[in-house]
Amino acid sequence: MKLAPLPSPTLSAHSLPKTTIARGTQLVRIHWPGKALFFGPAPKRPPRNRFDSQKHAFGACYLADTTYGAFAESFLREGRVSVVTEAELQQREWSMVEVREELTLVPCHGKALSKLGTTSAISSGAYSRSRAWAASLHAHPDAPDGLRYRSRHDDDQLCIALFDRAAQKVFVAETLPLLDPATGVIDAIDRYEVAVK
């Protein structure tokens, strides 16, 4: 597994690359019931996601531009997945999360990687490195609302790790059972050629 470089000790002395998400933009999240805007890790629980705080210094909520990205991040985490059970799908919900106030994010993909001093492994390599980057970006004087990254299992899809300090900048516009036709999850299942049993 390739490792992203660790953040430079001088990162805080330089301005960060930035991208914005406009007010009114709708983002997607696939989640457990009642956790449409969950900022993890949970108290006294170890971090489990890519950009979680190793020291519980902040929370991160994971969102995607599309249902495809949310599905890839939720169900394709273990690599090649050919089967998902209907029970797994029935246990989850789908939420449309709307941006209430413009979000300022650090792009962790494309040309911004060289400015940051990292590589695309920040989104696909060891969690220890991506968590170190999340901690450094969260602590940076620019105080970004979060970071934008490419999904590990479908790098056409852009996702967001939103820091809890930006929680008031978004709201849940709609929540549906994941298998509701309006969520687009059937299209995602077809896209990734996953069988449902």
Image (cartoon, rainbow, N blue to C red):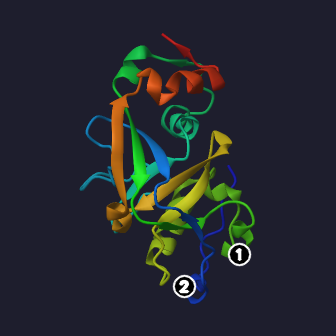
The number of numbered discs placed on residues in the rendered structure image is: 2
Residue visible at 67% across and 56% down in the picture: 121
The label on residue 12 is 2
Please state the horizontal and vertical placement of residue 7, each as a whole percent of the image. 59, 74
Tell me where residue 3 sits by quadrant: bottom right
Label located before the other in sequence (1 or 2)? 2
- Label 2, secondary structure: give it: helix
Residue visible at 60% across and 84% down in the picture: 15
Residue visible at 34% across and 55% down in the picture: 39
- Label 1, secondary structure: give it: helix
Q: Residues within 10 Å of mark 2 (few under 14, many from 20)?
A: some
Please state the horizontal and vertical placement of residue 70, each as a whole percent of the image. 51, 39
Q: Residues within 10 Å of mark 1 (few under 14, many from 20)?
A: few
Q: Nearer the viewer, residue 107 or 126?
A: 107
Q: Is residue 106 left or right of residue 57?
A: right
Q: Which residue is mark 1?
A: 115
Q: What distance separates the C-alpha of mark 1 from that of mark 2?
A: 13 Å
